[in-house]
Amino acid sequence: MNKIIEVKGLIKKYTNFQLGPVDLEIPEGCIVGLIGPNGAGKTTLIKSMLNLIHRDAGLVKIAGLDLNEHEREIKDNVGYVGEQQYFYEDKKVSWLGKFVSGFYSHWNDGLFYKLLEKYQINPKKKARELSKGMRVKLSFAMAMAHNPKVMLLDEPTSGLDPIIRREILEEMRNIAEDEKRSVLISSHITEDIDRIADYVMYLLDGKIILYSEKDTLLAEWKRIHYADGVLPDHLQGSLFERKTTVFGNSGITSNYSAIRDFLAPLISKGEVKIENLGLDDILICLVGRCRK
Ligand SMILES: Nc1ncnc2c1ncn2[C@@H]1O[C@H](COP(=O)(O)OP(=O)(O)OP(=O)(O)O)[C@@H](O)[C@H]1O
């Protein structure tokens, strides 16, 4: 599979924080969900990949082009929606669309107006008259109307109602399904990432601590509940977050396929139960493990 995004040795330093070195590759035609606690560096990573903030080191390539040499062409090929939306507040939506269209070579005015209609944004309204959610939707319309190969989305769905959130997620899925375009989306709403992502990337304290196919991740990470004396010591020792309560024992494995056959008869006898984990549970477990 061709990679559409390639990052090597990316470092960004602030006084009390360092992102990286980050190495990552994103294949064509997929959605990568970026998950991490507050302050992990998600915004810093996304902004560094677009030169919206200065990098201290590292290489960024998008659609085969080096960001240092081809910034303009790269921006032509990237749709970015950030946490905050900046517009000329006294200008109408129609004016803003026309203004933004001047920066892009593949701008599709028909698509822009179709999206405005779909998102129920009146082109005659001024930016300052738009609600928070409408501002996000306008940003999406602008980002999508120039037919980008890559969408970089930083917490884009946080201010949106569930109906439009779902629609936008579907739109991202459609973008990825044409097999050539990809989406990197950060979100604290892991339900959104669970819904659309092919890959999940966990960022903690400026480092990528886990990057995996989502289905593999969810198949391998399980919470095991077990009766006293049924698991050998080495297996118990390999579990994270081991707990013993009045209800029994439990612990988390990140490698379920390696112990599934061993556990099968115990499951049949009711001595072991397997609980699926969500992306949030995995984040909490990773944070606990890494910060020990
Ligand atoms: N301009 C800045 N100057 C100094 N430190 C900064 C600056 N911007 C971000 N940081 C620091 O960089 C770290 C990462 O911040 P960043 O905004 O990338 O995190 P995040 O994962 O996006 O967090 P959140 O989920 O809260 O949006 C934080 O410790 C933050 O305080």
Image: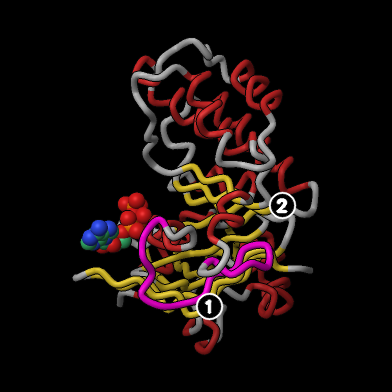
Precedes in sequence: disc 2 or disc 1? 1
- Label 2 to label 1: alpha-carbon separation: 20 Å
Q: In the shown orientation, is residue 2 left or right of residue 90?
A: right
Q: In the shown orientation, is residue 12 left or right of residue 198?
A: left
Q: Which residues are magenta?
A: 52-67
Q: Is residue 272 above or below residue 129?
A: below
Q: Amino acid at mark 2?
A: Arg
Q: Secondary structure at mark 2?
A: loop
Q: Residues within 10 Å of mark 2 (few under 14, many from 20)?
A: many
Q: Is mark 1 within 8 Å of ligand 1?
A: no
Residue bearing mark 2:
181
Q: In the shown orientation, is residue 73 left or right of residue 19?
A: right
Residue 133 in picture, x, y percent from top left: 44, 25
Q: Is mark 2 within 8 Å of ligand 1?
A: no
Residue 227 in picture, x, y percent from top left: 52, 70
**Res 269 seen here:** no
Q: Amino acid at mark 1?
A: Lys
Residue bearing mark 1:
8
Q: Is residue 19 magenta?
A: no
Q: Is residue 61 magenta?
A: yes
Where's the C terminus, which quadrant?
Answer: bottom left
- Residue depicted at x 50% and y 88%: 233
